[in-house]
Amino acid sequence: MGKKKDTFFNMVISLLVITVVSGFLLGYVNDLTMAPKAKARLQKKVNALKIVLPKFDNNPVENVKRVKSEKVKDSIEIYTAYANKNKVGIAVTGSSEKGFNGLVKLMIGFKPNGDIQDIQILDQKETPGLGTKMTKEKFLKQFRGKNPSTYKLKVKKDGGDIDALTGATISSRAFAESVQIAYDEFVKTIDSI
Amino acid sequence: MSNPPIIISASPHIHSEESLKKIMYDVVIALVPAFLVSLYVFGINAFIVAAVAVVSCLLFEYLIQKYLLKTNITIWDGSALITGILLAFNLPSGLPIWMVIVGSLFAIGVVKMSFGGLGFNIFNPALAARVFLLISFPVQMTMWPTAVVNNTQLIDGVTGATTLGIIKEGLMYGDTMTDLSSKIPSTLDMLLGITGGSIGEISALALLIGGAYLLYKRVISWYIPIIMLATITIMTGVFWLINPEQYANPLIQLLSGGAILGAFYMATDLVTSPITKKGMIVFAIGIGVITVVIRLFGAYPEGVSFAILIMNAFVPLINTYFKPRRFGSEIKSKIL
Amino acid sequence: MEYIVILIAAVFVNNIVLSQFLGICPFLGVSNKVSTSIGMSGAVLFVMTIATIVTYLLYQYILVPAGLDYLKTISFILVIAALVQMVEIMLKKVSPPLYKALGVFLPLITTNCAVLGVAILALGLENGSLLKATFFAMANSLGFALALILFASIKEHLELANIPKGMKGVPINLLVAGLLSLAFLGFTGLV
Amino acid sequence: MVSKINQKENFIKGIVKENPTFVLLLGMCPTLGVTTSAFNGFGMGVATLFVLVMSNIVVSLVKNQIPSKVRIPAFIIIIATFVTVVEMVLEAFVPFLYEQLGIFIPLIVVNCIILGRAEAFASKNDVFSSIIDAFGMGLGFVIALTILGATRELLGNGSVFDFKLTSENANTFIIFILPPGAFIALAYLTVIFNKLTSKITG
């Protein structure tokens, strides 16, 4: 079996054929995966919302409200959840750049009266084994059911009510700050929604 | 005792086993005052950590030489002893014993013996092990017994940050140096060693006495320690003059943390420092600058160990560019 | 200020080799001599910068408007491969000694993941612009150069060392890289 | 072309004698970059295995149609195509892994193992041998990455495949999930691997 000769024509044709075939193949796969990809991206948010909000029957993602704030780089997102047409909760994203390795981004679910329902971590790059412990139940549970109007969102060292993560005061502060930013935004918008 | 094979190495040029041993034991003598202070301040814990570090360093070196490398046992040349002492000097007195042992294993097994033993390691074993432990166990490695001012002895279990730690954290959250001045120990306390910190770094005075002994005995030359400390002083001095509320004054910077310990006992390590005068000067300035950059702008309050390790890595490069003058021909073959 | 941050991050804090693990192959393979590693760094600086400029423009002005951003990987690697060919031809003409020194390693730049990696990472820069992407590429190639040259000098030094048999070659190189990376952790939090 | 290759040997070589990670040192970037956990290492290994098998098949099928001067660009296009497929599929169906592996997914394209096998093996051998070769090499890579990932996860986090083996508050060596730990763990794993294989092969 002979190999194709190195003529210019052969070289161009073979590369062209390969490129065209690969282009079509990728286009096809792209079409196939387009919908699942979009769904996967949404799913992360929906999952987070399901965890931080009380049971709801609307689609909060559809009516997301984005607010610009000086305190955060990207906008704050506000999701409102309804059950039987009643407002049951509001989820607000909050973030802080003051983490040990920069950004800490959270989604915080509030009940209409301001109590924290639950918190999910959307993004963090803290030190493994230290700051990353913010994702653990032991740290998160101290926020549940608390109302930031009376519960001071500061670590105990700074005169607040939060038990900082061992060895990761900076991460804990960034976490607390994110929650505070989200709460401030919640207070501002609760009546307007 | 069988003669070891002739060693061809870049640095250091160890003249004989005897002179090497003498140097090593002079270093040990020089470390005694600082150790006595730490025994006084931290009590029995300091002794336990130091003993464990020394014994496990010697033991690991013995085991590796006997069973893994199957070479001559050289544990009594003093180098493993010094690694053990210096490692202990860089640890808090309350560190769990098993962590001390792990640190010794890293220092001897990974940083020293993996490279072929004394004379071949690139990085200072004790410092590399300290950084290894600091990054692995940041909580335990930064818990220091706090000085109780009127009763120079420390209370067990009461822990707090070092001077540099207090400053770093305070400044980060908007305090000024004036606000912090009541929280940090007085200059005299730092000089004497009535302060929180690693076992061997607390008393500047004791370390300086030992350093003077080493200079007097010509075990170390003054270039590295003095230039390194001068660099730290000048750099922090400039920042302090610009804004004394945001930057601690040079005296605090010199007396706190591991500046003096690092300058006299670890940056001067024969194996991991440059051979020529010019090389030493570049090396020392590098350590000073990196230390200050980390202390003032980095996440870690203290940067001496990192700075020395980073400059250790530069030593081969420094040695290439500042070659010792050779007698004879100076003809260089140029390849490119 | 923003640019200083990019520079410090790329060279010290998130060094492309020691902390991002890009360009490990040439790092472990090529850097036996300081002189070679300086040449290699130069070649990478050149290729990486031009590659990032071209791929940035390609992505922003052709792929994205045409909705073909999924062709990113394939088109980027082709651009890089073509660029390397061109650099090779140019070097052969302009500086034969350098060409000789880098010899077999130049084609390796094609499969140097640092080049493709930086080209892709440059797309994700905050408030990205062509200028910023270019600067980002240059800063990262400086980081690459620093790691490569340091490593080469250490390896030259180790040639005289009495490395235990089992550790010789790859393991000792990895260990040196690990200890270098350990030391560089001191820069954490600078930016 | 009649294959006279001992397929069993052809398969085994990738796992032991020519293990891409421990012996040939190929594909170091993802090896070090993603192995913070056993699962990530395994995922990366499988993604690479897929690309390796597919591109080996295609390359050995079209090898005679491609003029040798343009074979490298042709191989690169073939490989990049499958890498992009993997990228899209992971993003759509395993978004968690997609996020974890990040930039190292598109970088599979420059993994020297794949181009190396295409060039050294698939372009010279029949389809069947090429598949066996790819599976052997790919598995060698999967195994190496999983071992490295498991080691780092165990030392750094006290778990393997997210299965916690130590108590919640135990002190683990955080450094092993950080960059220096990757280099150090791989250094000593290579020593151990070489010791073991030299014992086996004599």
Image (cartoon, grey):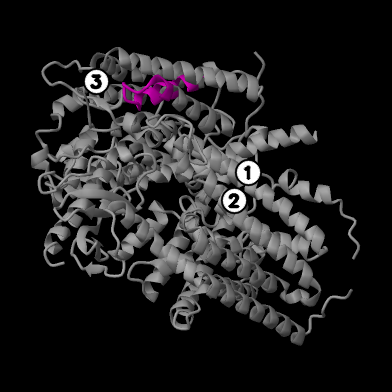
Residue with the mark numbered 1: C170
* Image position, residue C48 (x, y; %): 51, 68
Question: Residue shown at 44%/18% (left/top)?
Answer: B54
Residue B89 is a magenta residue = yes
- Disc number at residue B277? none
Residue with the mark numbered 2: C28
What's the CA distance linking mark 1 and mark 3? Answer: 45 Å
Q: Quick check: A98 left or right of C181?
A: left
Q: What amino acid type is highlighted by mark number 3?
A: Gly
Disc 3 to disc 2: CB gap under 8 Å: no
Residue D75 visible in the shown view: yes
The chain that hosts pointer 1 is C
* Image position, residue D155 (x, y; %): 49, 34
Within the image, what quadrant is residue D65 found in?
A: bottom right
Q: Main secondary structure of the magenta part?
A: helix
Q: Nearer the viewer, residue C15 or B1?
A: C15
